[in-house]
Image (tube, rainbow, N blue to C red):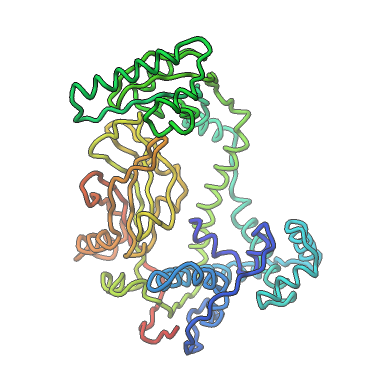
């Protein structure tokens, strides 16, 4: 389950227990009045979820969104929030129903212990907690009831999921061997430089002028007792000039080959002769050298165990929730319509759920300046202010990133279920000491339409099978490979015109 989905699985008031600080809520701006028609929006077996329950559930987050967004962007985020929250509420009801079948319960003593832990964590008192709850429009009794449900849900999950998940020593050792590069602390050096850039189109006279400047700076820097930081501030024409030429700690693979060779061939405390690279002339001074080391398995086995357990638990929990949903009678009559003409206009059967799983990336050309390439991607409708960014992934042979490397990231960074058609996936190249370099984007709206067109005429069985599809970025700079799958859900979606917000 992605980070965003997990966030809404926590009942609204339980956020207080996890926040780590007790802060009064800011006053939200008054929203425009609207007529709310109370109605049933979901049925879970013989239980129901009312529209007012959903609105109460999301209210704290909606107030926060109203403070940060406006117009259609605000509306879109609220719609996303409501859909995710509704799924979380359905999951909660299924889990609590399962607790009855397992004859599990939570005692008053367990609730008292949980409240005491919350008070300690937030360094407050019972009176302070009551004051906070009052500010949120909640009573202590209601809070304790919600906390009891949360504790009960944890018991069910531990019994149904946790006890079925284990990690043996051999799995830890195998993971360590397969990811040995992740547990190797490379040699790194603390360096400074006096830098004179040379443009690609520079004339011979311009190049010679920069060379002479580098020779002059080196002549002073090589003198016994020379103050390299002061000379860097005096002579350097690089971005680190104001920092005395400090480039910080540099590891192999983080800078382009010529500069790496110069840095790692210069001894500690020495200053290199002026050396020209593809970007200009460098005079390097090495302040400190820290040899590389291997982190032994015994030092990281606990961390690896936690990681593997979390991955297995998440996978098993997702399968378990799917099993609960399939075994229950679910009827959902709520659709906020994510965007005008969105998924409903692409798929006539609105009960279909489409997922895009990123499995590969192919760059049309390597980066060049900064050694071994790393790429990352961002999700959202704004490149400069995305909703999230992924972790960095190393580009392998042939300027490609494979399924295994991408699969090491959190599921939410590689699996997109019913993605917002207004969102894009922006691809970036990580550049050492500089802002990430933008590569290009792909549109989820285009991806959904392409899959719909490709699937026309397919039978239900064929449509349910994962299809491999590739999409190029808008500037043809990269290709992204996906496994695309459609699954049927037990949802009955009402006419969006019936919904008044």
The answer to whether 485 appears left or right of 169 in the picture is left
Q: Is residue 76 above or below residue 314?
A: below
Residue 130 image point, x, y percent:
75, 72
The answer to whether 492 appears left or right of 134 in the picture is left
> Can residue 323 be seen in this snapshot?
yes
Residue 237 image point, x, y percent:
37, 30
Q: Nearer the viewer, residue 293 or 356?
A: 293
Q: Nearer the viewer, residue 196 or 420?
A: 196
Residue ID at (31%, 31%): 369
The answer to whether 138 appears left or right of 88 in the picture is right
Residue ID at (40%, 12%): 219
Q: Is residue 188 above or below residue 500?
A: above
Q: Is residue 167 above or below residue 419?
A: above
Extreme residue toward the top, this view: 224
Residue 157 image point, x, y percent:
62, 59
Instruction: Classify the position of the C terminus by image quarter.
Output: bottom left
The answer to whether 145 appears left or right of 280 in the picture is right
Residue ID at (52%, 72%): 62
Q: Is residue 415 above or below residue 275?
A: below
Corner quadrant of residue 106: bottom right
> Can residue 45 be seen in this snapshot?
no
Q: Nearer the viewer, residue 322 or 186?
A: 186
Corner quadrant of residue 234: top left
Corner quadrant of residue 332: bottom left
Q: Give the mark count.
A: 0
Residue 493 image point, x, y percent:
38, 79
């Amino acid at each position: 389950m992605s980070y965003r989905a997990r966030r809404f699985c926590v009942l609204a008031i339980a956020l207080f227990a996890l926040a780590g600080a007790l802060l009064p809520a800011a006053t939200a701006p008054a929203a425009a009045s609207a007529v709310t028609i109370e109605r049933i929006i979901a049925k879970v077996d013989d239980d129901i979820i009312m529209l007012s329950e959903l609105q109460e559930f999301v209210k704290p987050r909606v107030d926060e969104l109203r403070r940060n967004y406006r117009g259609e962007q605000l509306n879109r985020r609220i719609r996303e929030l409501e859909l995710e929250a509704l799924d979380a509420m359905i999951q909660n009801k299924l889990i609590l129903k399962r607790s009855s079948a397992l004859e599990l319960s939570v005692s008053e003593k367990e609730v008292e212990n949980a409240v005491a832990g919350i008070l300690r964590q937030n360094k407050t008192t019972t009176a302070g907690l009551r004051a906070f709850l009052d500010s949120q429009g909640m009573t202590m009794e209601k809070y304790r009831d919600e906390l009891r449900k949360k504790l009960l849900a944890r018991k069910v999950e531990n019994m149904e999921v946790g006890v079925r998940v284990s990690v043996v020593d051999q799995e830890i050792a195998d993971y360590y061997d397969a990811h040995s590069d992740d547990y190797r602390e490379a040699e790194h050096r603390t360096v400074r430089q006096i830098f004179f850039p040379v443009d690609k189109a520079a004339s011979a006279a311009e190049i010679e002028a920069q060379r002479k400047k580098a020779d002059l700076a080196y002549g002073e820097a090589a003198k016994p007792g020379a103050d390299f930081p002061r000379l860097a501030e005096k002579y350097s024409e690089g971005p680190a000039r104001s920092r005395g030429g400090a480039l910080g700690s540099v590891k192999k693979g983080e800078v382009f080959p010529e500069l790496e060779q110069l840095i790692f061939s210069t001894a500690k405390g020495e200053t290199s002769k002026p050396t020209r690279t593809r970007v200009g002339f460098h005079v390097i001074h090495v302040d400190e050298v820290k040899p590389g080391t291997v982190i032994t398995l015994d030092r990281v086995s606990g961390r690896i165990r936690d990681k593997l357990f979390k991955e297995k638990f998440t996978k098993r929990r997702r399968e378990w929730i799917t099993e609960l949903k399939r075994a229950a009678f679910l009827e959902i009559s709520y659709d906020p319509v994510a965007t005008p003409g969105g998924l409903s206009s692409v798929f006539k059967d609105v009960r279909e759920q489409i997922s895009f799983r990123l499995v590969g990336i192919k760059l049309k050309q390597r980066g060049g300046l900064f050694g071994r390439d790393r790429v990352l991607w961002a999700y959202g409708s704004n490149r400069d202010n995305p909703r999230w960014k992924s972790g960095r992934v190393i580009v392998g042979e042939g300027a490609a990133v494979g399924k295994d490397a991408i699969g090491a990231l959190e599921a939410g960074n590689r699996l997109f279920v019913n993605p917002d058609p207004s969102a894009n996936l922006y691809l970036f190249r990580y550049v050492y000491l500089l802002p990430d370099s933008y590569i290009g984007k792909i549109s989820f709206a285009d991806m959904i339409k392409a899959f719909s067109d490709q699937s026309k005429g397919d039978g239900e069985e064929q449509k349910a099978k994962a299809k491999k599809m590739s999409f190029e970025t808008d500037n043809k700079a990269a290709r992204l490979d996906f496994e695309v799958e459609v699954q049927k859900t037990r949802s009955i979606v009402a006419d969006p015109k019936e919904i008044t917000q």
